[in-house]
Image: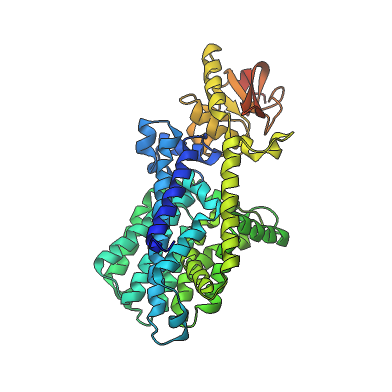
Amino acid sequence: MRHHSPSTWAAICIFIAALVHLALGFSIEFSVDEAHYALYAQHLAWSYFDHPPLVGWIQWPLVAITSSEGVIRLIPELLWVLSVYLVYQISLQIHRLIQGSHGSYLTSALPSANSCAFMAVLVIIASPLPHVLAIGLLPDTLLTPISLGLMMMGLRWIANNDFQLSDWLITGVLLGLAGLSKYTAAFTAFALLLVLLSTPKKSWLTRSGFWLAVFIALFFITPVIYWNWVNDWISFKYQIAHGNGGQWAWRRVAAFIGIQVACFGPLLFIGGFLFLKDCLNTHKATLLALLSFFGIPFAIFAALSGGGSLPHWTTPAWFCLAPFAGIGLMKAWSMHHRLSIRVLLIFQILLCFVGFGLVLSGGLPATAVKSNPIADLYGWKDAGHKAAELALSHQATGVAVQNWTLGSRTAWYARPLPVYVLDERKDQFDLWFGQPEAGSNIILVNWSGMPYEAPVGSKSAFEACEPLENLEIIRFGQYLSQFKFSLCRNWQGPGLLE
């Protein structure tokens, strides 16, 4: 590595990782969440049932001209590259902030800024879960570079103890985009507020630029507010219930921590701890305020995990920790703790490649679909096309599934046919397609990974369902799952049998 600078090696590593992402992105079908948010782009609206609209808006130009998964996935890939670039730049700025304390023990022991920034990039590339969000566009994929951008604005405030009008404008736009990305962007906004409060000069409350930034941010999120107002605040009600989860239990919190280590790798944990231990000798209040970009969302999600949570929700927080982790790890590296860091880096990178290989191969052989989670990634395109073909040949008015997680990819690959979700839960599909008309005939799709009994002979059911065809999904000679298609006649929806 002596023949190239750390910045060159960082660019090389980012380029290699991006090639792997693109290879995977053009090889596999949409996941359930990707298809759901691609449908956002197909059904443009001011907002949506479960999330703000930016994840759909940003895809709309590509969805309007193509249905290629690989092409649409160029968007999350560009966002991932931007995020890693911002991690590198933030690492340089934090290093510069620490180095501002001349003559301290830390100044003489701290490695070069570019070396620390390179290490920060490495720990992100070696983290397994961020690669998923680099391939598939989720709201967290959007919120990650926006959170890092707000963190950079916080560093700019710390460096100058003031903002120009252009800085306030940029901050307002970033806050507005964050609000359009995900409701949890409020945690990032609060972290930025702590940074503003951490400096001695706090005249920003009386500055017109600050209130202009607030106005811009509020203006950006008016579509979300308006849509919820028109739709009885259903998105806010859903998020509150979703955040509360089930019955709270400490074991879920412990599981959450363990899953976070597995998904993001121990190096980020260790690097963050080492920074707190060895690099917090100066600017404590300022650095702790910056660390709140990680600490606030992570602590809240850990607390909420007692009732249930998803591991990728913390992705923006981990990216915000990466610059600190890079500095902490590089300082340990300079003090001859290199073997353990090398071993962990190699282990995490090998783990990533094992994951890539399993995704491409279809997973390990399993006797049941639920034993092979990779099976969920294959077969939906063929199933959607088959459902559309059967609907046409049997003059059915649409397609039906019995759970929303089955509906997203069915609706994407069977479009423009309406896809009805036959359950009692109100969701986005009810807003898009409603319920089947009374007496209509529907093609019912059943997947072996989440099988249901045909809805026949009771309220909210069909008069009869006739099996049509089965579709087995095979990859490299391995059985993954099976789709069953039925023609269900004479829909008798809620209230029709009373």
Q: Is residue 459 above or below residue 300?
A: above
Left or right, residue 226 beside residue 438: left
Scheme by which the image is coloured: rainbow
Residue reaching furthest to the front: 3
Quadrant showing the C terminus:
top right
Question: Of residues 111 and 409, which is closer to you in this image?
Answer: 111
Give me the residue at 58% from left, 17% from top. Answer: 441
Q: Count up the numbered dots.
A: 0
Q: Is residue 53 above or below residue 293?
A: above
Give me the residue at 56% from left, 12% from top. Answer: 394
Left or right, residue 236 beside residue 373: left
Quadrant showing the N terminus:
bottom left
Residue reaching furthest to the left: 165
Question: Of residues 488 and 253, which is closer to you in this image?
Answer: 253
Q: Is residue 225 visible?
A: no
Residue reaching furthest to the bottom: 103
Place of residue 132 in the rendered image (x, y in percent of width and height, measured from the top left) = 52, 47
Q: Is residue 485 above or below residue 255?
A: above
Place of residue 303 in the rendered image (x, y in percent of width and height, measured from the top left) = 62, 63
Question: Of residues 318 and 52, which is closer to you in this image?
Answer: 318
Place of residue 26 in the rendered image (x, y in percent of width and height, measured from the top left) = 46, 35
Give me the residue at 37% from left, 56% from top. Answer: 176
Question: Of residues 210 and 60, which is closer to you in this image?
Answer: 60
Q: Is residue 126 visible?
A: yes
Give me the residue at 27% from left, 70% from top. Answer: 208
Place of residue 428 in the rendered image (x, y in percent of width and height, measured from the top left) = 51, 38
Q: Name the image quarter holding residue 193.
A: bottom left
